[in-house]
């Protein structure tokens, strides 16, 4: 597979991102980058933090430290095509199933994560919830943030997604920092926007980011529809703790938090106040507190 690798110097001196880089190689010769931060005296959980579109592990830079301080190990991979991970140059190498397979290889085959507390956002949920349903034995609990798992059986994506779908294909230049800034309540500093742009030196590195919006099933006969229906069949019988933590002002995925909580047995829903879609930027401390509290709460599920 022909892929691109963002030059390391693009990631020099990123604000608030002191984490060591770790890499593993998966099929196709793809190198995947991940953060793996561990406390000096581990006493907590293994937390898997999955980002979405068009972000990378930088999204969790202010969520990870308080979780590690609470005794948890935090693993935050960059999805293939994003961050410091390799980026296939051919756009159509990126499929929904390919992303599921790449992520499975990374977190299970390579890193062998078990008893995972999953924190998933945006496309990180659309992938992570699939893996949860297909490998339930690997997971301990779930915190879903501003995400959904569409099947294309209804108009569940809504008008805002249609606007984003069109814009993602037509905008040029495609600058992730500006896109993320539009979905936060407070304006991002220029250095933070630059950090989100860092993985993509030019358009050739953006094939994954351009393709992601096209992969969500919006019709019932989409290639991803049946696997997602199968995942829902498992989720609707789920017996592990599940929390939906959604930004108060997210107009795109916000309505899905309560809907998901209603479909999953024992699931609960909380609202992250004063936060939009990228709540990790708006309210990182509040999100970390919600995660820590949920982990510490005795489970009545199962």
Image (cartoon, grey):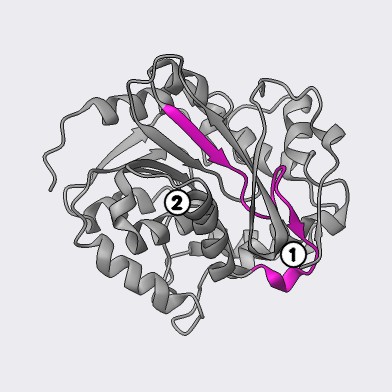
Which residue is labeled 1 in the image?
A: 169
Question: In the displayed structure, does residue 210 sit left or right of residue 69?
Answer: right
In the image, what residue occupies the spot 41% across and 59% down? 131
Q: Please, is residue 15 above or below residue 243 in the view?
A: above
* Percent x, y of residue 222: 50, 80
* Percent x, y of residue 64: 51, 25
First in residue order: circle 2 vs circle 1: 2
Q: CA distance from mark 2 to mark 1?
A: 21 Å
* Percent x, y of residue 111: 50, 45
Residue 168 in view, yes or no: no
Foreground tag (2 vs 1)? 2
Q: Is residue 45 magenta?
A: no
In the image, what residue occupies the spot 48% across and 43% down? 250
Question: In the displayed structure, does residue 38 sit left or right of residue 56?
Answer: left
Residue 147 is labelled as 2
> Which secondary structure, mark 2?
loop
Q: Provide the residue span drawn in magenta.
A: 73-94
Q: The N terminus is located in which quarter?
A: bottom right
In the image, what residue occupies the spot 37% across and 53% down? 256
Q: Nearer the viewer, residue 137 or 13?
A: 137
Task: Report the number of numbered marks.
Answer: 2
Question: In the displayed structure, does residue 140 sit left or right of residue 53?
Answer: left
Q: Nearer the viewer, residue 191 or 275?
A: 191
Q: Is residue 79 magenta?
A: yes
> Which secondary structure, mark 1?
helix
* Percent x, y of residue 20: 65, 27
């Amino acid at each position: 597979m022909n892929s691109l690798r963002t030059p390391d110097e693009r990631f020099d001196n990123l604000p608030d991102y002191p984490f060591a880089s770790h890499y593993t190689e998966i099929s196709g010769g793809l190198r995947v980058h991940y953060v793996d931060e561990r406390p000096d005296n581990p006493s907590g959980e293994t937390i898997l933090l999955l980002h979405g579109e068009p972000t990378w592990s930088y999204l969790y830079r202010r969520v990870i430290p308080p979780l590690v301080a609470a005794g948890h190990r935090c693993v935050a991979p960059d999805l293939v095509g994003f961050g410091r991970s390799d980026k296939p140059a051919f756009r159509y190498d990126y499929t929904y199933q390919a992303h599921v397979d790449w992520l499975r290889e990374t977190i299970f085959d390579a890193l062998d994560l078990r008893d995972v507390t999953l924190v998933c956002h945006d496309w990180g949920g659309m992938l992570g919830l699939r893996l949860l349903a297909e490998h339930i034995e690997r997971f301990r609990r779930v915190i879903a943030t501003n995400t959904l798992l569409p099947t294309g059986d209804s108009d569940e994506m809504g008008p805002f997604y249609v606007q984003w779908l069109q814009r993602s294909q037509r905008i040029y230049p495609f600058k992730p920092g500006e896109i993320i800034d539009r979905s936060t309540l407070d304006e991002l500093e220029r250095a933070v926007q630059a950090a989100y742009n860092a993985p993509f030196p030019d358009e050739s590195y953006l094939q994954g980011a351009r393709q992601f919006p096209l992969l969500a099933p919006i019709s019932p006969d989409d290639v991803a529809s049946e696997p997602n229906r199968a995942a829902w069949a498992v989720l609707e019988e789920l017996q592990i703790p599940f929390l939906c933590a959604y930004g108060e002002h997210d107009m795109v995925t916000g309505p899905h938090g309560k809907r998901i909580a209603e479909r999953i047995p024992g699931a609960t829903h909380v609202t992250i106040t004063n936060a939009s879609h990228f709540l990790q930027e708006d309210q990182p401390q509040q999100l970390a507190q919600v995660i820590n509290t949920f982990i510490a709460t005795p489970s009545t599920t199962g």
